[in-house]
Image (cartoon, grey):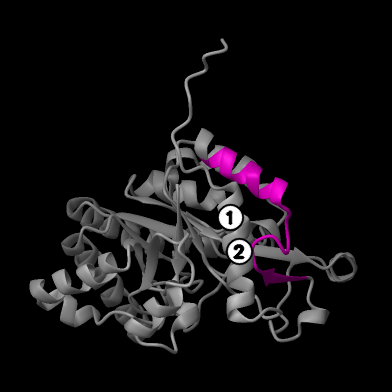
Amino acid sequence: MKLCLFTPLFNGLDVDAMLAQVKRYPQIEMLELGAGCWPGSAHMDVNALRADAGKRRDYLAKLAGQGLEISALSCHGNPVHPAEEIARRDNSVLRKTIELAATMGVKTVVAFSGCPGGSGEDATPNWITAAWPPEFGDMLEWQWTERLVPYWKEIARIAAEAGVKIALEAHPGFSVYNPETLLKLRKMTGDAIGINLDPSHLWWQGIDIPTAIRELGAAIHHFHAKDVAINPANRSRNGVLDTKSYRHMAQRSWMFRSVGWGHDELEWKGIVSALRLAGYDGVLSIEHEDALASTHEGLSAAVEMLSRVLLKEPPVEAWWT
């Protein structure tokens, strides 16, 4: 396993300035780079790189000169959005990202499943969270049958032909938000579809991460290292579904934190051990979204914690058996 950084926390910097900041952390060996949609593309010109092999070589050489490689290109969007303009835009970004990843030798593209409307007449996404009233079930069936499966089956085909895996980040608000929905979509579309496992989005739903890892197994294509802290008093009053702004941190039932500030080192060791048992030997990509810490204070905490729990060397034979 290798330590990686998801770079949007430095979106205010150009690629050279971003690399100068990353150089402060020699433990980081790989980068996950935004290629459009919500992560933005501050650190790579996707269209220029798609069009020019020389620019791709120069870009990769720039990273290699800093001892860095690319773990994944990320373009979290909603390509099944009911608004045609948004769906067309995000679909275009995803397809371009898959094409660019293939030409750069990057094996993984990280994305969201997206969320359609509840019918062909809806103008906004509709995330179904309950089985009743009865129309909710009809809406959910329509979303999967008419929008999600046809779209992602085609994307899975394109990705497989390009030698690229799609790692969908399970995120509430979208149709894939837990292991069950990810595995359902994977079964219906193909093995090119897997998960970008971000434990922070699963913890607050009450999901045990090592259990999720065992369930997902070979479907784990990429991993985000991000923590979450639960506020017991607010959760006891209001539960975990919380639509208050992330800026209202004291009032929320949970908030994102730097690795180690929501769950302790032993918990993270259990996660890394579960990943190894599941056969995952990829990156732990730090996604820093901790509003209580400065960029470097939060990032330093994550790097230090993960450097202690990362299993970098191959396991030994069980010589004692």
Exactly how many numbered labels are in the figure?
Answer: 2
* Residue plotted at (26% across, 65% down): 64
In this rendering, position of residue 34 left or right of residue 143: left
Three-letter residue code for mark 1:
Leu
As for residue 198 lying within the magenta part, the answer is no
- In the rendered image, the quadrant that contains the C terminus is top right
Q: Which mark is residue 192?
A: none
**Residue at the (55%, 49%) spot, across then down:** 179
Q: Is residue 42 visible?
A: no
Residue 68 falls left or right of residue 131: left
Q: Nearer the viewer, residue 30 or 156?
A: 30
Residue 139 percent coordinates (x, y): 53, 65
Q: Vertically, is 84 above or below 214?
A: below
Q: Is residue 57 above or below residue 217?
A: below
Using the rendered image of the protein, determine whether residue 28 is visible from the camera's viewpoint: yes
Q: Residue at x 52, y 14 (%)?
A: 319
Q: Which residues are magenta?
A: 254-275
At mark 2, the secondary structure is helix
Expressed as whole percent of the image width and height from the top left, the position of residue 298 reads 63, 73
Q: Residue at x 40, y 43 (%)?
A: 187
Based on the picture, tell me whether residue 259 belongs to the magenta stretch.
Answer: yes
Image coords of residue 299 (percent x, y): 58, 71
Q: Percent position (x, y) of residue 235?
A: 84, 66
Residue at the limit of the structure toward the bottom, as seen here: 12
Q: Residues within 10 Å of mark 2 (few under 14, many from 20)?
A: many
- In the image, residue 86 sits, relative to residue 311, either above or below, namely below
Q: Disc 2 vs disc 1: Cβ atoms closer than 8 Å?
A: yes
Q: Read off the residue under disc 2.
A: 302
Q: Residues within 10 Å of mark 1 (few under 14, many from 20)?
A: many
Q: Amino acid at mark 2?
A: Ala
The answer for how far apart the CA atoms under marks 2 and 1 are is 6 Å
Q: Which residue, given by chain and number where applicable, does mark 1 sit on?
A: 306
